[in-house]
């Protein structure tokens, strides 16, 4: 088990706990690999809500953030009824949204999965990709970073 806490360059992270459901598993009763992305999403949503930029607030501001790249490294399986803690850590926010993930088995403390997602701001009205994140989003993050440093 790793003991080092990595909360990213800004100290902004969120954790969610999940219980592996029967429908998440393959016939061998281990989590099917594609479902780990769903677990990332649960923690990413929690992080965005912590920032104050939930999916509804995102849409109201006129932007969406489609995933443009995602990766996962599977280190150990999760099984039916395991409890897991999914941590999402903000690593970039000015030009794109990049989030690092770690999934740990709560019972054993074992790191089971690592991942990274990259999202790009998309102006809904203009129908165009943005190469910098919306000012409202950046201000929310910078306000939180300022609170953490105080």
Image: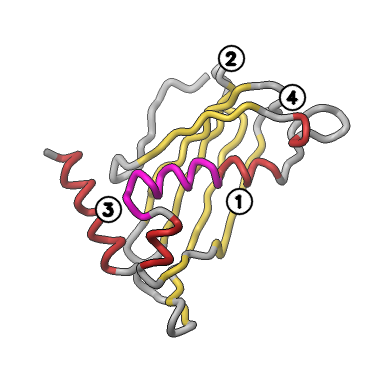
User: Is 77 colored magenta in this rendering?
Assistant: no
- Tell me the residue that label 4 is attached to: 80
Q: Looking at the picture, how far across and down is residue 2, in whole percent? A: 48, 22
Name the residue rendered at 77%, 29% in the picture: 22
Between disc 1 and disc 2, the foreground one is 2
In the drawing, what numbered circle is on residue 71?
1
* Cα separation between marks 3 and 1: 24 Å
The range drawn in magenta is 41-53
User: Which is nearer the N-term, disc 4 or disc 3?
Assistant: 4
Between disc 4 and disc 1, the foreground one is 4
- Tell me the residue that label 3 is attached to: 141
Between 68 and 137, the residue placed more toward the observer is: 137
Name the residue rendered at 43%, 77% in the picture: 123
SS at circle 4: loop
Between 127 and 118, the residue placed more toward the observer is: 127
Circle 3 packing at 10 Å, graded few (<14), some (14-19), many (20+), is many
Q: Looking at the picture, how far across and down is residue 136, in whole percent? A: 27, 64
Q: Looking at the picture, how far across and down is residue 58, in whole percent? A: 40, 62
């Amino acid at each position: 088990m790793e003991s080092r806490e990595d909360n990213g360059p800004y100290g902004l992270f969120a954790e969610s706990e999940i219980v592996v459901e029967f429908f998440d598993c393959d016939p061998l009763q281990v989590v099917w690999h594609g479902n780990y992305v769903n677990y990332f999403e649960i923690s990413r949503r929690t992080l965005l809500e912590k920032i104050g930029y939930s999916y509804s607030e995102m849409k109201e501001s006129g932007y969406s953030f489609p995933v443009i790249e995602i990766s996962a490294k599977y280190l150990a399986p999760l099984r039916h009824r395991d409890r897991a803690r999914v941590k999402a850590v903000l690593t970039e926010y000015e030009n794109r949204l990049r989030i690092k993930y770690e999934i740990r088995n709560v019972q054993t403390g074992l790191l089971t999965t690592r991942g990274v997602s990259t999202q790009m701001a998309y102006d809904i009205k203009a129908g165009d990709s943005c190469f910098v994140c919306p000012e409202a989003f950046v201000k929310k993050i910078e306000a939180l970073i300022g609170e953490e440093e105080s």
